[in-house]
Image (spheres, rainbow, N blue to C red):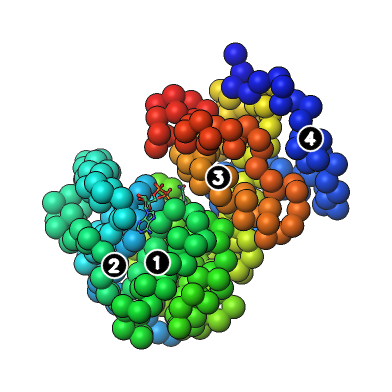
Amino acid sequence: MLAGGSHWRKSSSVECRRTTADPRPRSSYQSLVPFTAAYGFGARVVSRPVESSKAFEHVLVVGAGQMGGGIAQVVAASGRRVSLHDAAPGAVERGLEAMRKSLTKLAEKGGADPDEVLARVQPADDLVPADLMIEAVIESAPVKADVFRRADELFAPEAILASNTSSIPITTLGAATGRPERVIGMHFFNPVPVLKLVEVIRGLETAAETAQAIVQLARDLGKEPAEAQDFPGFVSNRILMPFINEAVYAVLEGVAEPEAIDTIAKLGFAHPIGPLALADLIGLDTCVAIMDVLHEGLGDPKYAPCPLLRQYVQAGRLGRKSGRGFYAY
Ligand SMILES: NC(=O)c1ccc[n+]([C@@H]2O[C@H](COP(=O)([O-])OP(=O)(O)OC[C@H]3O[C@@H](n4cnc5c(N)ncnc54)[C@H](O)[C@@H]3O)[C@@H](O)[C@H]2O)c1
């Protein structure tokens, strides 16, 4: 039985999407690029020398979900002190538990001692001042803007405020503070300890020194930075989300079972994971939030989330984090 019901097939949103005029050939954004290239496609890999760097000895990570936990882990593994804050009771403890599991696996392959890394992570009941904030709360512009506003009041003027947002304009987050020149996007990829890319996004007012310091930090963390402009979805999700959305439409329209769709992407395009399994990993709620930003920000209905994706979120099927999405976990 396919996950989507046939009643969706002639829905007006499907029709609306299909009539969207897109001057580009569809193959230009559905091309069979290898998965790794899809993550970095179109972005300029930063290779210019960095003139200034900051040590960022103490980093506050806000949000201890799958991304915040991963970010706290790689920052602590680099020898820095991390404060980890989450608004939800028990979230930091769950984040620390996930970090221990990941660090234990990495230690088996010669990685750092998990106890040593975890000793550098301090749970924080509220925001605490640090040299750098990396915000990784839910993909909601008002929630993120509120975190930036509060951090701006608390942090020393020279501190940098970064967001791991997938799609929300960095310029908007900068405008919530009195230091837009020190606000930047530092977009990690999931799972953070494994994937090398950090997309670095400058808002309209972000200073060059801020970008250079964050590029240098990404390298210190063993990552490869690539710069993108502050457009909705930046580069990565502008490419990835239409790909995922198209796979969801293929489920909805009964073209194939989720397993077959993912097998086609894995074996046909040499992707390590299919688009539906990837959507489950990202979180279907996060996918919908990103697509809403792309849709609104770029003004093209082709970015509107597939109704089936929205329905899964309404049903609480958020993917791996809730135990069920396109697959059961
Ligand atoms: N999931 C991915 O694959 C992925 C990849 C790159 C970037 N991102 C981005 O990273 C961010 C976090 O995504 P995630 O997948 O970790 O989500 P998640 O749902 O796993 O975690 C979000 C956490 O934020 C916490 N939170 C919510 N409001 C808060 C507040 N006001 N203060 C402190 N904590 C708060 C929640 O309690 C939750 O623990 C989002 O902006 C998302 O777009 C996600």
> Could you tell which of marks 4 and 1 lies nearer the N-terminus?
4
Give the residue type at disc 1: Val
CA distance for labels 1 and 2? 8 Å
The residue under label 4 is 12
Q: Residue furthest top?
A: 1
Q: Local crowd at mark 4 within 10 Å, few (<14), some, or many (≥20)?
A: few
Asked if the beta carbon under badge 1 is closer than 8 A to the nearest atom of ligand 1, the reply is: yes
Residue at horizontal 30%, vertical 50%?
88
- In this rendered view, identify the residue nearer to me: 137 or 27: 137
Please state the horizontal and vertical placement of residue 7, each as a whole percent of the image. 72, 22
Residue at horizontal 28%, vertical 59%?
85
Asked if the beta carbon under badge 2 is closer than 8 A to the nearest atom of ligand 1, the reply is: no
> Could you tell which of marks 2 and 4 lies nearer the N-terminus?
4
> Could you tell which of marks 2 and 3 lies nearer the N-terminus?
2
> Could you tell which of marks 1 and 2 lies nearer the N-terminus?
2
CA distance for labels 2 and 4? 45 Å
> Could you tell which of marks 1 and 3 lies nearer the N-terminus?
1
Give the residue type at disc 2: Leu
The residue under label 3 is 287
Kindly report which numbered mark, 2 or 3, lies closer to the viewer in this rendering.
Answer: 2
Q: Considering the numbered disc 2 on the image, is that residue within a helix, a strand or a loop?
A: loop
Kindly report which numbered mark, 1 or 3, lies closer to the viewer in this rendering.
Answer: 1
Q: Local crowd at mark 3 within 10 Å, few (<14), some, or many (≥20)?
A: many
Q: Local crowd at mark 2 within 10 Å, few (<14), some, or many (≥20)?
A: many
Please state the horizontal and vertical placement of residue 78, each as a whole percent of the image. 26, 63
